[in-house]
Image (cartoon, grey):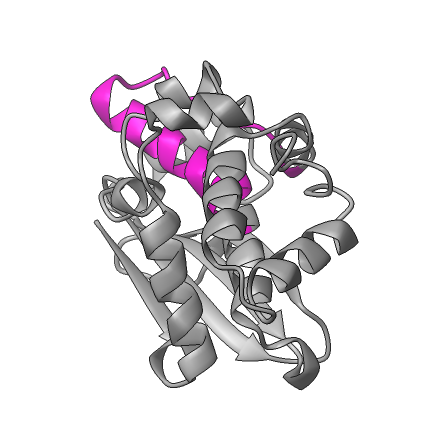
């Protein structure tokens, strides 16, 4: 339905710069990407990440930025039954249980909620972009894919647990690798690409998922 960047993305220049940089790096695969060892997997990326997340049937994607003690991120799938206000956390559901919940709550409002924080000492564009890339590629996109598949052909959606999503990222998620490769080879300033790499190195899941030689 739509993707919205809120919280510090609405007011902080560093967060706004990170959003703009992610948008520029979120592109379709190109022939030159073969030099990074990205093929053939990226050939399956039929649309940009932000383009896909902005058009999920029946669901909004909300990306919220804030400052706390640590640079971290988290993603939830939230459902609110029609006519109610109580939020149901659907993050841990399987494809089957998600299907059952949706069938039991027709017209429910769905949101894929991505929350990221940085501390005053880690508020750099590169840090924010790495967290965004991780959360949107590894977690938000699988939920989007499930909802898109279910809207097109009920019963066909597939979604993994958070652990399975993390294993897919560690194995070399093509979306994360493509955006990361474009980012660290394009934004070379000291508070951008190096901070992206630093944040990735601190993340035991995303660590070492840039393509060889990038």
Number of marks drawn: 0
**Residue at (46% x, 21% y) in the render:** 34
Q: Is residue 184 magenta?
A: no
Image quadrant assignment for residue 189: bottom right
Q: Is residue 80 visible?
A: no
Q: Considering depth in this image, is 107 or 123 the residue closer to the camera?
A: 123
Quadrant the C terminus occupies: top right
Task: Look at the picture and state if 6 lies above or below 144.
Answer: below
Task: Look at the picture and state if 178 lies above or below 39.
Answer: below
Q: What's drawn in magenta, residue-wise?
A: 135-162
**Residue 146: x and y, percent?**
39, 29
Q: Considering depth in this image, is 198 or 203 the residue closer to the camera?
A: 198
Task: Look at the picture and state if 137 lies above or below 171.
Answer: below
Image quadrant assignment for residue 209: top right
Q: Is residue 177 visible?
A: yes
**Residue 9: x and y, percent?**
39, 75
**Residue 83: x and y, percent?**
26, 60
Q: Considering depth in this image, is 102 or 209 the residue closer to the camera?
A: 209
Q: Considering depth in this image, is 5 or 99 the residue closer to the camera?
A: 5
Q: Is residue 156 magenta?
A: yes
**Residue at (56% x, 36% y) in the render:** 93
Q: Main secondary structure of the magenta part?
A: helix
In the displayed structure, does residue 47 sit left or right of residue 63? Answer: left
Task: Look at the picture and state if 64 lies above or below 135.
Answer: below
**Residue at (28% x, 25% y) in the render:** 46
């Amino acid at each position: 339905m739509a993707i919205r960047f809120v919280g510090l993305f609405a007011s902080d220049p560093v967060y706004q710069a990170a959003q703009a940089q992610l948008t520029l790096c979120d592109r379709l695969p190109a022939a030159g990407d073969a030099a990074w060892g990205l093929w053939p997997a990226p050939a399956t990326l039929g649309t940009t990440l932000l383009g896909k997340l902005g058009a999920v049937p029946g669901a909004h994607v909300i990306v919220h930025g804030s400052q706390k003690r640590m640079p971290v991120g988290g993603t939830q799938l939230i459902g609110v039954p029609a006519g109610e206000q109580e939020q149901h956390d659907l993050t841990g559901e399987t494809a089957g249980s998600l299907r059952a919940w949706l069938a039991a709550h027709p017209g429910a409002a769905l949101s894929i909620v991505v929350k990221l924080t940085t501390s005053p000492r880690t508020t750099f564009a590169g840090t924010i972009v790495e967290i965004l890339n991780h959360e949107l590629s590894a977690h938000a996109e699988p939920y989007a894919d499930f909802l898109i598949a279910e809207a097109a052909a009920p019963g066909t959606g597939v979604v993994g647990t958070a652990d399975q999503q993390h294993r897919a990222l560690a194995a070399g998620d093509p979306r994360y690798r493509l955006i990361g490769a474009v980012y660290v080879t394009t934004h070379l300033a000291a508070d951008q690409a190096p901070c992206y790499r630093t944040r990735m190195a601190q993340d035991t899941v995303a660590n070492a998922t840039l393509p060889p030689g990038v």
